[in-house]
Image (spheres, rainbow, N blue to C red):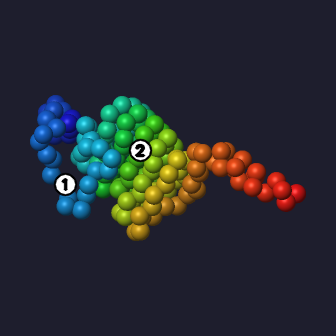
Amino acid sequence: MLKFSRMGSEPATTVSSRESTPSPASYTPAYSEPEGLLSEDVELKGTLHFSKALELNCKFQGELNADGPLTIGPQAVVKGEIKASSNVVVQGKIQGNIVAEGTVELKSQALLIGDVTCTTLIIQQGAVFSGCSHNSKASDLSSAFGSLFQHLD
């Protein structure tokens, strides 16, 4: 696991995936254990692209391009667009849109102000979502639905 942390002038540290990092008891990363972690003392601005599982607990402003699973941790505050070719789990706060080829899951403590486009959207009780949701398979669904009513015309 990689852990990036801002501690004076110390370089980023590499942690073996066998070592565990402390986390609240109620928090569990979804889908897969992250190989990278951006901790809460990190602030980033710009474009971030990654291909393996990543957990963000930092402040981030910009564009996230995720080829691997993405977890927005409970301490994260993100302002920007998220484009993911995998699953996205949100436990923190996001202001911006999410476009994912997989599932987007809003955990109970999540706050999302923005639109979501994905194949499956899961919203747990307690999560706050202000925006529109779009199913990325909507064109397939609307044509199937339309054929059901062709006999009524």
Q: Looking at this view, is 74 or 5 the one in front?
A: 74
Q: Pointer 1: residues within 10 angstroms few (<14), some, or many (20+)? A: few
Residue 117 left/right relative to 145: left
Identify the secondary structure beneath mark 1.
loop
Q: Pointer 2: residues within 10 angstroms few (<14), some, or many (20+)? A: many
Q: Is residue 8 visible?
A: no
Q: What amino acid type should be assigned to the residue bearing mark 2?
A: Asn
Residue picked out by circle 2: 87
Residue drawn at 45 percent across, 50 percent down = 104
Snapshot quadrant of residue 52: top left
Residue drawn at 12 percent across, 40 percent down = 18
Q: Is residue 89 above or below residue 83?
A: below
- Whole-percent x, y for residue 66 in the image: 41, 36
Q: Is residue 120 visible?
A: yes
Residue picked out by circle 1: 23
> Mark 2 or mark 1, which has the lower sequence index?
1
The image quadrant where one finds the C terminus is bottom right
The residues bearing labels 2 and 1 have C-alpha atoms spaced at a distance of: 21 Å
- Whole-percent x, y for residue 149 in the image: 79, 57
Q: Residue furthest front?
A: 151
Residue drawn at 49 percent across, 54 percent down = 121
Q: Is residue 7 above or below residue 40?
A: above
Residue drawn at 31 percent across, 40 percent down = 54
